[in-house]
Image (tube, helix red, strand yellow):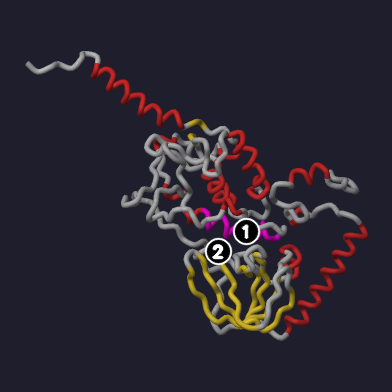
Amino acid sequence: MAERSPWFLPVVVAGLAWLAGDAGAALCEEITIPMCRKMPWNMTRMPNLLHHSTQENAKLAIEQYESLVNYVPSCSPDLLLFFLCSMYAPICTLDFSQEPIKPCKKVCEGARAACEPVVLRYNHTWPDHLKCDDLPVYELGVCISPEAIVTDEPPDIGASSESMEIKQPGKSREKGRHKQKCPKCKRLKFSYRNYEKKTYHYVLRVLVKGMEHRGDEIATTVNVMEEWKHHAISVPKGEVQLWTNSTCKCPRLKPNQEYIIMGYEDSTNGRLLLLPDTMVTNYADKWPKRFKKWERRLKRSSGGKRRKGRKKQRPDDGLQGDSPDLENSRNRRQTGPERHGDES
């Protein structure tokens, strides 16, 4: 006669299975970080991808980027906020509750390409902990991007994380999803007003030799004919590379064409950058003389401002004079010198 199992064994097994399933759900918690409350997911888990153990810690850390998200003129605030929240308040679902889901590399690259020029303008560099190198590629790994989220509600309404689909390797995309495309490249108007506002690090006269993709970046090889300005990196005559930290070509340059390029340096890595915020124009004989005139005008303008004190900001000046980041911007607003005149 076969030995019968104790009557309570099925109940114990069922209870253990229920506890195992509920343990995954218990890792998820409702998002309380104000900047991320409007994301198309409402559940997160801690520690996050940046090792903050609580949402309160993550909230204090992400707030240093609030002025960059709200920067005027805009640097793709929706994509930037999506990327930041996917790092500081990563989505948590029942299917993926064991570890945080990373944003896709293209999300990081898009946010960085749009907003790094603003960061560089204030002599900061893109933070190491927000670099894109180790993030998964959309087609190959488990990651989150705006086009990978499927909900029954519009994107600006908080949707339950349980109703969302996350991109997994080997699974085809849902109908209606589109491969991420490069945004339309708009060449910045080559003008003194933009030159004054952008505070570029370098100004070069170059002949474009060619471009090539190197991983997730583009290296544009140019022959430097004249250096008119530099900041931390002195540029010799001869071939140098201008780096675009994206696979999207912007601004677009033609080989064997001579240009004046005004852009930013990445002094940490010793590189010259070619970004969407770079100012480019075809070379003409008028430009050397005109650039010298711009420099004299800029020096006179800077000297006048120092003598007269800080003027009231014009509406179209954006955040000029007030860093859009980064950790100390709030302290500068609180402890900076008093403004003169009527602020109303």
The relative height of residue 183 versus residue 129 in the rendered view (above or below) is: below
Q: Residue furthest top?
A: 7
Identify the mark at residue 237; answer none if there is no mark: none
Residue pictured at 86% horizontal, 54% vertical: 311
**Callout 2 amino acid:** Asn
In the shown orientation, is residue 321 left or right of residue 341? left
Please name the residue that numbered disc 2 is placed on. 245
Give the distance between the C-alpha atoms of the residues marked 2 and 1, in whole angstroms: 10 Å
**Callout 1 amino acid:** Glu
Please name the residue that numbered disc 1 is placed on. 116
Residue pictured at 76% horizontal, 52% vertical: 322
The relative height of residue 32 versus residue 287 in the rendered view (above or below) is: above
* Neighbours of disc 2 within 10 Å: few (<14), some (14-19), many (20+): many
In the rendering, at what x and y percent does residue 68 appear?
Answer: 66, 50
* Neighbours of disc 1 within 10 Å: few (<14), some (14-19), many (20+): many
In which quadrant of the rendered image does the C terminus lie? Answer: top right
Q: Residue furthest bottom?
A: 285
In the rendering, at what x and y percent does residue 257 appear?
Answer: 58, 83
The relative height of residue 43 versus residue 122 in the rendered view (above or below) is: above
The relative height of residue 165 versus residue 120 in the rendered view (above or below) is: above
Magenta run includes residue 68:
no
What range of the chain is rendered magenta? 108-121
Q: How many marks?
A: 2
Mark 2 and mark 1 lie on one chain; the one further toward the N terminus is: 1
Asked if the residue at tag 1 contacts the one at tag 2, i.e. Cβ–Cβ closer than 8 Å, the answer is yes
| Residue 24 or residue 343, whichever sits in front | 24
